[in-house]
Amino acid sequence: MWLKVITLVKNKHFLSLAGNVIMSGLGLVTMVLIYHALSVNDAGIWVFFQSILILVDTFRSGFITTAFIKFYAGADTKRMAEVAGSAWWLGLIITALLLFINIPAFLVTPYIHDESILMFCRWFGLNYIFSLPWFMATCVLQGEQRFDRLLYVRLVNQASFLLGVLLLFILGKVNVIAVLYIYLGANLLTSIYALAMGWTRISSLTQRSPQGIKDMFHFGKFSVGTTLISNLFRTSDTFVINFILNKQAVAIYNLGQTLMQLVEIPLRSFAATGMPELSVAYNQNNRFSVISIMKRYTGTLSIVLIPAVILGCLFADLPIYLIGGNKYAGTDAANVFRLFLTFALLYPADRFFALTLDVIHHPKVNFYKVLVMLVANIVFDWAGVYLLGSIYGIAIATVFPVLIGTLIGYRALCRYYPFTIGSIYATGYRQVKYWISKSLNKSTAVNLF
């Protein structure tokens, strides 16, 4: 019995899922404190500020993360050091460019009247300096599939932020600027921890090579565009709401979106473990195995999400009240959550189709796909606001670009190795049936995939 428990705890899928559950749980508690302590308007300011911060950080994370894992996972020792050093070099250059851009941005702050944009222009350069070492550590640890250490890094970051906000809450000192200082401090502390543990591979800088930098640059120039537009796709709703409606609507809409962690937790977890597995199959030139792995992940997650979607729709009002408090009771937040859940079953296919296209070295397809999705999202968002005049129009509009992106990804993968949509869900059904059978036989299915 204990041997099975130990084996399960060491399983990479379990560690990745547990890490995302813990991080999302801590993040949710932090959001509860922020939403309860701040006014609806101030909560909207913080949400929009973070949306801009994450969007701009895409220039670094999008350029490096996918390319790093692709070239690092399964490589020999010399190549791994070359990739790590080249990635660090690119990370330093990108961070330096962002810091340089921060100078003129800071000078124009007297002419900016939006509080979120004003905060961003003053602080984004410092934030990206503080977060670089621990960002690089997450790339290294994911490439090495050390999800236990990845959990520790993320835990230090999220827990320190939560404890700082909790202290402010106890002292009655919660305001947007104070939360910002705690956020910057948490990033700095996490980077110090990652450097002290030796998980950043910063010493590999000396082993960078022109070829390694070139490889990552040519792959990254497409993946960064894909990731940037993908993040812009996710944040474009917030931008439209902020500039057409108001900050209060931003807070209400984001509260409904926050509960989509029910879907995002398993997606992020298995995407993190699935990409190295897909990379190994691709590097072995096994097309059948690449598609089989993709189908297994996509189908299983889709089937498992069905009961979560049903329960979420039935009890949406309760978590909205618990997270936001009385200020958000009776608002549109619960219905926004329900609307997102109704088409959440498309997310696994969209996510793993895109991941597989990156692995098989077709980032250009993903780039054009998310570009089409972004355009479609903006068009349907404007149409939704025009027709309904509320955040309902934007929530409903999101289904169309997700459906378009899924179909584009499917067509592209079929050119690599033909398969049917039905076979994905059949594979997922068989996997879930196998788990249930094992459970009924009182035998723990340790090997999740």
Image (cartoon, rainbow, N blue to C red):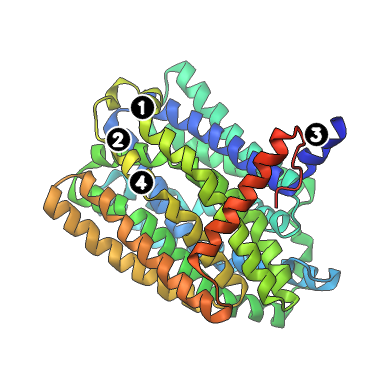
* Nearer to me, 425 or 359: 425
For the residue labelled by badge 4, is the local secondary structure a helix, a strand or a loop? Answer: helix
Density class for disc 1 (Cα within 10 Å; few <14, some 14-19, many ≥20) is many
Give the residue pinned by disc 1: 324
Please say if 146 is above or below 440: below
Q: Which sits earlier in the primary sequence, circle 1 or circle 2?
A: 1
Does any portion of residue 149 appear in the rendered image? yes
Give the residue pinned by disc 2: 333
Looking at the picture, how far across and down is residue 293, in whole percent?
A: 65, 63
Density class for disc 4 (Cα within 10 Å; few <14, some 14-19, many ≥20) is some
Give the residue pinned by disc 4: 342
**Badge nearest the viewer, 3 or 1:** 3
Does any portion of residue 86 appear in the rendered image? no
Badges 1 and 2: C-beta atoms under 8 Å apart?
yes
Density class for disc 2 (Cα within 10 Å; few <14, some 14-19, many ≥20) is many
Give the residue pinned by disc 3: 5
Real-space Cα separation, disc 3 to disc 4, in angstroms: 35 Å
Q: Which sits earlier in the primary sequence, circle 4 or circle 2?
A: 2
For the residue labelled by badge 2, is the local secondary structure a helix, a strand or a loop? Answer: helix
**Badge nearest the viewer, 4 or 2:** 4
Q: Which sits earlier in the primary sequence, circle 3 or circle 1?
A: 3
**Badge nearest the viewer, 2 or 3:** 3
Real-space Cα separation, disc 3 to disc 1, in angstroms: 37 Å
Q: Residue at x 58, y 54 (%)?
A: 428
